[in-house]
Image: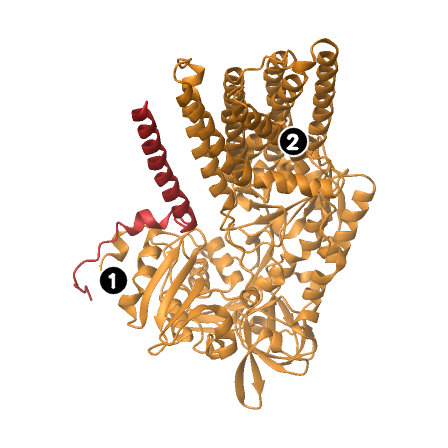
Chain colours: A red, B orange
């Protein structure tokens, strides 16, 4: 029985961590703009190499 | 710029003519700076600019690499949805004005309007998403904790069972105390106005369920209905979030301040002083440049006014004003500079006073409640009767079961299903409409559109296009070579008439133009090949002064100083929309209302039939009063318009639809925004809105079947948590499928993009 209680507490606290992560990401504004972040990660900063 | 043009093969908008050097001089003003910047310490300044030009991934790249163009920029971050860039710069090395000029020089001119001074930027309300997240978390965990009991946990494990129950109780607390808060708020709001709305019944059910479940757990008599409780709150919140989705790039509440510039140049002697708009006083002389908006009513004292009133009237052809005439606020000067002697403060101008009128301000009476609310009230009454009857029955036969029966009835019969069917259908229909570029302010608009029986159209800009003209040439027959020459010359100018003329004539590669000269307000000339070609006003080309209004808009042409003829410009109707409009006449009365002269009466009567009311020379107030008079006769009115001159009528009507050539553009405040290209679908949009009600009722009937099944157990006092736990998600999910399926089906049958 004690094993189940241990598992239960563990699973709920893991789930609670994910919930906290979700709440943080919403408050942090990560869902405000869904277009630019996926593109931003594609922009490589090439070493300086001016074309003109 | 390394790979700028490799990022996207259609980099889009070309650079506009560079604007005049002192355009952003007003940004040097401390007072204006303070109101525009969001944060400032002794080194860094944070500022957010609205850049309407942002449209592709390349824009993102360029704007986020500003620091490569200018060392003073520390970072820049784009919010694509809002079309904003937030720039952090070192104000020791640069200034706000220089940053704005830098943006302008790379083609992103910041749009700074008087509205920015008020600093009332609405922020998106995130609390609903948070409430949804927490409800989802609790629902999932409580469901898992309830499984052992449903599956028949061994009775030897009494301690474990109790622990599961108490854990469920604890987990349901955030749902009841936090996630369900929006329902408490609306229920309380309704009660304060002595109105029993749907949310009040839902709150009652939530409380009854929670307290009965808590009692069962604490008295160790049962496991409670925590899973059903948190589940239903979770589903209802999903519905609300879907329904209340907002369009970040659109604004439905613009007033004149978002059209007006933030500052204007005031002339004091020989000095040019950039002054914030609220500080303009009568008696000041202001300088209006090419492409600037006239911010206050004034008398023209120098220069020639050639004013484009398309913001105000929807009419795109410029109007000339001579010295000494009054120029009203809201027009845009095209051509040369002019000077105005201000006669009224900005907030007192004709345009602003239109906005300040009570009729425009007064929020429409919100007594027009949705049919869902009245349905919910009947429903609540019926449920309370059933609960009472069940209570009375058990009081006669077995008083020990009253408590179970009555609470169970209240639990089963909460109008959650009605709320679910309503919010899910509304949410999906809003989504479908927005895919077709028809954006509604909120879900109530669907119902307002569906219940309308009278449609009023504005003519200019709605039934006619703002950018296309019908062009007819009169005069000496032109050869092809001459046509190419004229079109190549006109292509050099950015005047709306020149551009229209180029589009009308251009059928060959443009020819080279030498010695191009543009005389604002008069015309243009230049050498094409060896011929001197001139295009422009009557006075400029033919030397005959004096315009008569019957002539309408004409552009005269001369080659080698010989006048050849003129192009007559007329409005181009959006004829592709006419079949849809005629179809609307089958079930609605129609009217067309226009600020123009009745010159087009016969055409319109021919297009729309003799039973369509046509009104001409209507001032903005007249339009408003016309809508009011229709409403007083008991009609529900849809107003479709585009300009600020329709703003009052749009607001007064039951559903005001603003037509916009480009949805990123500015539209007057309205209930809905429709892209002009989608006007031919208008009749189908209205039919989809009408389908909305049928779908809500159908899914409500389905949910009543579930309710009856639940009530069957409830009145007997045998509603076990297991049955509740099956009925609740089953009914929610089947409602979800039914509403989504049937609204998508309805849209497909109407051939709308789903």
Would you say residue B576 is visible in this rendering? no
The location of residue B631, given as percent across then percent down, is: 79, 43
Most extreme residue toward the right, as rendered?
B633
Q: Which mark is residue B204?
A: 2
**Residue annotated with mark 1:** B1
Q: Is residue B221 left or right of residue B370?
A: left
Q: Is residue B637 left or right of residue B235?
A: right
The N terminus of chain B - image quarter: bottom left
Above or below, comparing residue B130 to residue B99 in the picture: above
The location of residue B56, given as percent across then percent down, is: 36, 51
The location of residue B439, given as percent across then percent down, is: 55, 43
Would you say residue B137 is visible in this rendering? yes
Between residue B480 and residue B702, name the one nearer to us.
B702
Between residue B297 and residue B281, name the one nearer to us.
B281
Q: Residue at x 27, y 55 (%)?
A: B5
Between residue B6 and residue B479, name the one nearer to us.
B6
The location of residue B722, given as percent across then percent down, is: 50, 16
**How many residues crowd around disc 1 within 10 Å: few (fewer than 14), some, or many (20 or more)?**
few
Q: Is residue B713 left or right of residue B625?
A: left
Above or below, comparing residue B59 to residue B353 in the picture: above
Above or below, comparing residue B429 to residue B591 in the picture: above
Q: Residue at x 29, y 25 (%)?
A: A3
Q: Chain under label 2? A: B
Q: CA distance from mark 1 to mark 2?
A: 63 Å
């Amino acid at each position: 029985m004690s094993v189940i209680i241990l598992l239960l507490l563990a699973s709920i606290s893991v789930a609670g961590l994910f919930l906290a992560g979700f709440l943080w990401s919403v408050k942090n504004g990560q869902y405000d703009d869904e277009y630019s972040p996926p593109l931003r990660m594609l922009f490589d900063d090439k070493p300086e190499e001016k074309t003109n | 710029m390394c790979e700028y043009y490799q990022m996207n093969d259609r980099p889009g908008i070309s650079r506009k003519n560079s604007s005049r050097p002192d355009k952003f001089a007003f940004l040097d003003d401390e007072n204006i700076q303070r109101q525009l910047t969001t944060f400032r310490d002794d080194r860094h300044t944070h500022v957010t600019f609205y850049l309407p030009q942002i449209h592709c991934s390349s824009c993102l790249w360029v704007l986020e690499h500003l620091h490569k163009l200018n060392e003073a920029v520390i970072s820049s971050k784009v919010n694509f949805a809002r079309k904003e860039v937030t720039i952090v710069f070192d104000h020791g090395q640069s200034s706000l004005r220089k940053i704005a000029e830098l943006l302008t020089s790379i083609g992103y001119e910041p749009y700074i309007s008087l509205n920015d001074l008020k600093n009332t930027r609405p922020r998106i309300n995130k609390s609903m998403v948070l409430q949804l997240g927490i409800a989802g978390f609790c629902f999932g965990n409580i469901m898992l904790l309830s499984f052992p009991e449903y599956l028949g946990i061994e009775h030897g494990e009494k301690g474990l069972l109790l622990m599961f129950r108490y854990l469920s109780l604890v987990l349901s607390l955030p749902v009841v105390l936090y996630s369900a808060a929006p329902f408490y708020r609306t229920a309380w709001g309704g009660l304060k106005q002595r109105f029993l709305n749907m949310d009040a019944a839902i709150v009652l059910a939530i409380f009854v369920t929670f307290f009965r479940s808590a009692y069962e757990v604490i008295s160790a008599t049962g496991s409670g209905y925590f899973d059903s409780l948190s589940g239903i709150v979770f589903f209802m919140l999903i519905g609300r979030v879907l329904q209340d989705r907002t369009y970040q790039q659109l604004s439905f509440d613009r007033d004149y301040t978002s059209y007006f510039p933030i500052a204007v140049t005031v002339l004091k002697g020989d000095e040019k002083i950039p002054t914030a708009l609220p500080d303009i006083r009568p008696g000041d002389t202001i300088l209006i440049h090419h492409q600037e908006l006239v911010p206050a009513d004034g008398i023209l004292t120098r220069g020639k006014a050639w004013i484009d009133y398309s913001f105000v009237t929807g009419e795109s052809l410029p109007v000339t004003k001579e010295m000494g005439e009054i120029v009203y606020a809201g027009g845009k000067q095209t051509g040369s500079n002019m000077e105005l002697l201000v006669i009224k403060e900005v907030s007192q101008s004709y345009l602003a006073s239109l906005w300040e009128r009570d009729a425009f301000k007064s929020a429409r009476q919100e007594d027009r409640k949705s049919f869902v609310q009245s349905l919910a009230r009947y429903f609540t009454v019926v449920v309370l009767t059933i609960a009472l009857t069940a209570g009375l029955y058990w009081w006669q036969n077995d008083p020990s079961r009253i408590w179970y029966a009555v609470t169970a009835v209240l639990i089963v019969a909460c109008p959650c299903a009605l709320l679910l069917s309503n919010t899910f259908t509304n949410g999906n229909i809003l989504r479908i409409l927005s895919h077709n570029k028809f954006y509604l302010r909120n879900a109530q608009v669907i119902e307002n559109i569906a219940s309308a029986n009278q449609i009023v159209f504005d003519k200019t800009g709605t039934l006619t296009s703002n950018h296309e003209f019908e062009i007819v040439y009169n005069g000496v027959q032109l050869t092809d070579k001459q046509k190419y020459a004229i079109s190549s010359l006109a292509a050099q100018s950015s005047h709306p008439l020149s551009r229209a003329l180029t589009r009308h004539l251009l059928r060959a590669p443009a020819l080279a133009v030498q010695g191009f000269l543009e005389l604002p307000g008069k015309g243009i000339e230049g050498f094409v090949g060896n011929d001197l070609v001139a295009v422009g006003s009557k006075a400029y080309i033919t030397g005959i002064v004096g315009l008569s209004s019957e002539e309408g808009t004409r552009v005269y042409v001369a080659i080698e100083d010989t006048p050849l003829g003129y192009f007559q410009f007329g409005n181009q109707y959006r004829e592709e929309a006419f079949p849809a409009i005629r179809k609307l006449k089958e079930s609605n009365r129609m009217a067309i209302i226009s600020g123009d002269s009745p010159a087009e009466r016969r055409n319109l009567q021919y297009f729309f039939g003799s039973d369509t009311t046509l009104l001409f020379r209507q001032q903005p107030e007249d339009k408003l009063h016309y809508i009011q008079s229709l409403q007083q006769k008991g009609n529900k009115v849809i107003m479709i318009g585009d300009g600020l001159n329709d703003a009052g009528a749009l607001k007064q009507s039951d559903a005001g639809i603003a037509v916009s050539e480009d949805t990123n553009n500015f539209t007057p405040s309205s209930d809905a925004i429709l892209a002009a290209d989608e006007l031919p679908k208008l009749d189908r949009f209205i039919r989809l809105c009408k389908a909305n009600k049928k779908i809500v009722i159908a899914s409500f009937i389905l949910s009543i079947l579930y309710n009856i099944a639940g009530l069957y157990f409830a009145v007997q006092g045998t509603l076990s948590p297991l049955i509740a736990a099956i009925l609740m998600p089953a009914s929610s999910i089947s409602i979800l499928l039914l509403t989504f399926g049937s609204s998508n089906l309805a849209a497909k049958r109407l051939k709308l993009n789903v």
